[in-house]
Image: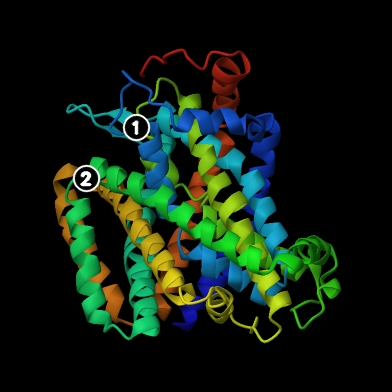
Amino acid sequence: MEFVETLSSYLWGWPMIIMLIGTHVYLTVILRFPQRYLFKAIKLSVTADKGSDGDVSQFGALATALAATIGTGNIVGVATAVALGGPGAVFWCWLTGVFGISTKYAEGLLAIKYRVKQPDGSMLGGPMYALEHGLKLKWLAVLFAVFTMCASLGIGASVQANAISTVCYDSYHIPTYIVGIVVAFLVAAVVIGGVKSIARVCGALVPFMALFYVLGCIYIMVLNGQFLWPAVTLIFESAFNPSAAGGGFVGGAVILAARYGIARGLFSNESGLGSAPIVAAAAKTRNPVRQALVSSTGTFWDTVVICAITGVVLVSSVLAHPDISFTDGAVLTKMAFSKIPYVGTPFLMVALSVFAFTTILGWCYYGEMAVEYLKGKRWTHAYRVLYILIVFAGSVINLVVVWNVADCMNALMAIPNLLSLILLSGVLVKESRYYLWENRLDETMKEE
């Protein structure tokens, strides 16, 4: 346990944070700020690209990617950042999302550029294919696939299932094994149908749940109305001057607020991790840049919108209710949402449970594609069975070690993916110039 915890702390320390932020900024500059095409990207995300090759719609691919990223990190993760780094951590988390849009754009572009069409017409893609076909680094592609498969069983299956069983037990004392059986059954009912089934369920659940959660946050902000502007002001001021936080908030160093805000932002939106492009490759799209733009909106919704709203809710709640504890992320979250009369606790339970459930579905697809890359399609059925069993096991066991192992696998996924983004940046610029900067978004690419 000590070894894994030390390794996790090292992998997610400043070197990784600097590597990710550096990639975000570098891609933002060389790709001429893809963030300025955000409204065009949102419009494309809800527009069907009929007649194009792929397994699911662009919106279905986006919904599946969002399902895997919008989770407990958006709620408890932001609260942990505030508890450990002070209100200023919210600003750094938000800023990470703004620059992360460029990296998610780049990942989506390479996913389509280097995807492979199977004999049955299905599409396979992701960083492993960019590494193999774009950089001719087969061994690194294999490592990425192995790390992805391991991460899917950790952060995707067991950790999320444990979050659901824990919140159900803490709220209504429902036995964890009963929750585990129900969740495993529901997961099995969805994943047995493959990516189309997963995309269909995520496409229905994710927009509804995100809207439901945002409305709940807006209600809390209305309750905290007179503290809303002071909370926003405090977030910006304490990002550069933590001692301005006062009121018992953690403070003392800008670097502390930046560290926890950036780390939680990166962990929440997964920009640079290499997971989202795996499902982006399955999208029906006529050229790489169209899907790249659609993929980039995922980071916007996840971090720039949902994480930011959560941060304002938490900080305004602490200002409005001095009795709220801010020393622990989970406690801070529960106490903030408990201020919603009558429905606060069940609201938080439902939000966390659905977010975690959709994350389980999204990561199942990521792991399945990694297994197919490593061993072929015939092994994916065995993987699904294993994944469902791990979902149940995660609901009933202690996950201290699993959390740290999952963190390690995520970091190890990011390293080869970031390498492919940097080394293939010339391809990113070339494709962006042809399709985006020279206004050829409606042109259909020739599949290589």
Report x, y in % for residue 261: 66, 63
Report x, y in % for residue 346: 41, 73
**Residue 16 seen in render:** no
Foreground residue, 317 or 60?
A: 317
Question: Mark 2 — residue?
Answer: 194
In the rendered image, which quarter is residue 262 located in?
bottom right
Question: Mark 1 — residue?
Answer: 57
> Measuring 37% from the left and 79% from the top, which residue is drawn there?
166
> Measuring 54% from the left and 47% from the top, which residue is drawn there?
301
**Amino acid, disc 2:** Gly
Foreground residue, 124 or 216?
A: 216
Report x, y in % for residue 109: 49, 31
The image shows residue 124, relative to residue 230, as above or below, that is above
In the rendered image, which quarter is residue 219 located in?
bottom right
**Which is more foreground, mark 2 or mark 1?**
1
Q: Secondary structure at mark 2?
A: helix
